[in-house]
Image (tube, rainbow, N blue to C red):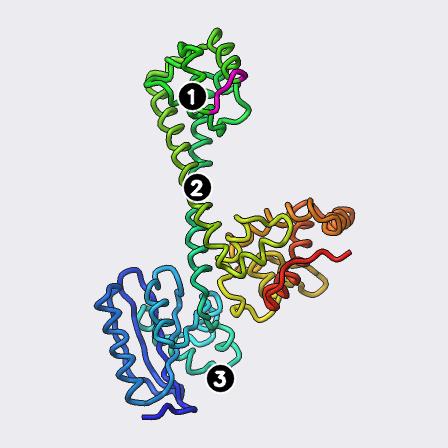
């Protein structure tokens, strides 16, 4: 059959951890069927088999909506896009508001799938229903890879920070003056020194010749360590805590190498990403922040305007005024990873661009704190970023 221009096949998916509920119907309001699939290859095959059967029967285009796009929806969401079906994300917060206005008889996953189908069928007639559905465009592969790499790097960095905090606390309790020989326990030469013996207490007896063989320790650090060795004192806990300290030091060294390897991969992938290269052209953004932002943005087609991009980055707040009271509140739809990367990048950017520094100082003079002033500058940069990505041209400083 030839595809009808007026009719469309709607598929609503309520995503679960192990099983997904499906409801199918037509854009004219007709309900077709509901079924359940397992989150495994056999279940995905059943899903597309049933969709293709209805598609062939009615000869109309297919649109799929998922309440939990990404997350547990992977890889079903990617397979939907590969089948060239239109994919929509059901905004959870707005969907909850929709269900408050149009309540169902009960709350189950199967009923949620039917409710999603009802929402789909009403989107051309009800503004609220249209707002709940956000179309998902095909994201360039290099940006999808950057998203995975940068999120993995962020998890490792957070783990490294936690282990370092534990390491420093234990060192302070076991041998405070050992920690005093370095300003930061994260220094690689210090971590290698901690792991250079089989017992922590033996560090007080390491010879100078052995010290100089440890990578990163030269004459200056060897002198510092030998000065400490003359006054080294250990608490009674060193017998059992010393092993923990050395394990933590070895783990930090391991994480350092893994993060370094991830950053090398990110550098190669970002060369293929137009978005990452454009963002990297902004002074202060650098490889890490540019890669994180490119991965979290994915495709600019997700955003209707620079205002929606600013809300996603957490650089703009929503109006929260009532009566004589004026105020604002942060959006619940911001991306916390993109916001963190943006705050770091903007702070570095204003230190490198005089005009941005002047804008920051102007906001501080108006009484804003550091973070609000950075967000104000970030809001201004979002306008520039949106236009840069839209027109695919790099950042330029105009005299």
Instruction: Please tell me which of labels 3 and 2 falls first in the chain.
Output: 3
Name the residue: 39% across, 24% down.
245
Residue 36 located left or right of residue 123: left
Residue 190 located left or right of residue 21: right
Q: CA distance from mark 3 to mark 2?
A: 48 Å
Choose mark 1 or mark 2, whichever is in front. Answer: 1
Name the residue: 65% across, 48% down.
349
Name the residue: 45% across, 65% down.
140
Where, by quadrant of the figure, is residue 38 drawn?
Answer: bottom left
Q: CA distance from mark 1 to mark 3?
A: 69 Å
Residue 36, x across and y down, in percent: 25, 71
Most common SS among magenta residues: loop
Query: Badge 2: how crowded within 10 Å, few (<14), some, or many (20+)?
Result: many
User: Marks 2 and 3: in contact by CB < 8 Å?
Assistant: no
Q: Residue 214 shows which numbered tag? A: 1
Instruction: Please tell me which of labels 1 and 2 falls first in the chain.
Output: 1
User: Marks 2 and 1: in contact by CB < 8 Å?
Assistant: no
Choose mark 1 or mark 3, whichever is in front. Answer: 1
**Disc 2 secondary structure class:** helix
Q: In which quadrant will I find the N terminus? A: bottom left
Query: Badge 3: how crowded within 10 Å, few (<14), some, or many (20+)?
Result: few
**Disc 3 secondary structure class:** loop
Picture mark count: 3
Indicate yes or no whether the magenta region holds residue 113.
no
- Tell me where the magenta segment starts and ends, as one range: 216-220
User: Marks 3 and 1: in contact by CB < 8 Å?
Assistant: no
User: On the image, numbered disc 2 is attached to which residue?
Assistant: 259
């Amino acid at each position: 059959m030839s595809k009808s221009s007026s009719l469309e096949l709607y598929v609503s998916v309520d995503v679960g951890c192990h099983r997904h509920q499906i409801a199918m119907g037509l854009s004219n309001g007709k309900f077709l069927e509901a079924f359940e699939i397992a989150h495994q290859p056999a279940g995905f095959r059943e899903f597309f088999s049933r969709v293709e059967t209805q598609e062939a029967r009615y000869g109309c285009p297919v649109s799929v909506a998922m309440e939990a796009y990404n997350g547990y929806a992977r890889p079903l969401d990617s397979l939907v896009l590969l089948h060239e079906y239109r994919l929509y994300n059901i905004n959870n917060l707005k969907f909850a508001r929709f269900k408050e206005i149009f309540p169902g008889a009960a709350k189950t996953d199967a009923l949620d799938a039917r409710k999603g189908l009802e929402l789909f069928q009403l989107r051309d007639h009800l503004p609220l229903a249209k707002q709940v559905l956000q179309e998902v465009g095909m994201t360039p592969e290099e940006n999808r890879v950057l998203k995975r790499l940068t999120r993995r790097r962020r998890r490792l960095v957070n783990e490294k920070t936690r282990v370092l905090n534990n390491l420093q606390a234990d060192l302070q309790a076991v041998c405070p003056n050992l920690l005093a020989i370095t300003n930061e326990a994260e220094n690689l030469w210090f971590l290698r020194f901690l792991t250079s013996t089989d017992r922590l207490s033996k560090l007080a007896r390491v010879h100078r010749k052995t010290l100089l063989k440890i990578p990163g320790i030269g004459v200056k650090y060897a002198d510092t360590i030998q000065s400490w060795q003359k006054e080294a004192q250990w608490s009674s806990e060193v017998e059992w805590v010393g092993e923990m300290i050395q394990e933590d030091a070895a783990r930090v060294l391991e994480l350092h190498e893994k993060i370094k390897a991830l950053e090398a991969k990110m550098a190669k992938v970002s060369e293929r990403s137009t978005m990452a290269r454009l963002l990297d052209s902004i002074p202060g953004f650098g490889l890490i922040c540019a890669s994180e932002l490119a991965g979290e943005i994915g495709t600019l087609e997700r955003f209707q305007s620079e205002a929606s991009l600013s809300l996603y980055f957490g650089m703009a707040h929503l109006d929260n005024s009532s009566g004589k009271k004026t105020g604002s509140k942060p959006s619940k739809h911001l991306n916390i990873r993109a916001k963190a990367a943006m705050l770091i990048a903007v702070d570095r950017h204003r230190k490198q661009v005089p005009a941005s520094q002047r804008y920051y100082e102007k906001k501080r003079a108006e009484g804003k704190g550091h973070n609000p002033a950075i967000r104000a500058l970030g809001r201004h940069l979002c306008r520039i970023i949106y236009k840069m990505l839209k027109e695919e041209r790099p950042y330029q400083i105009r005299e």
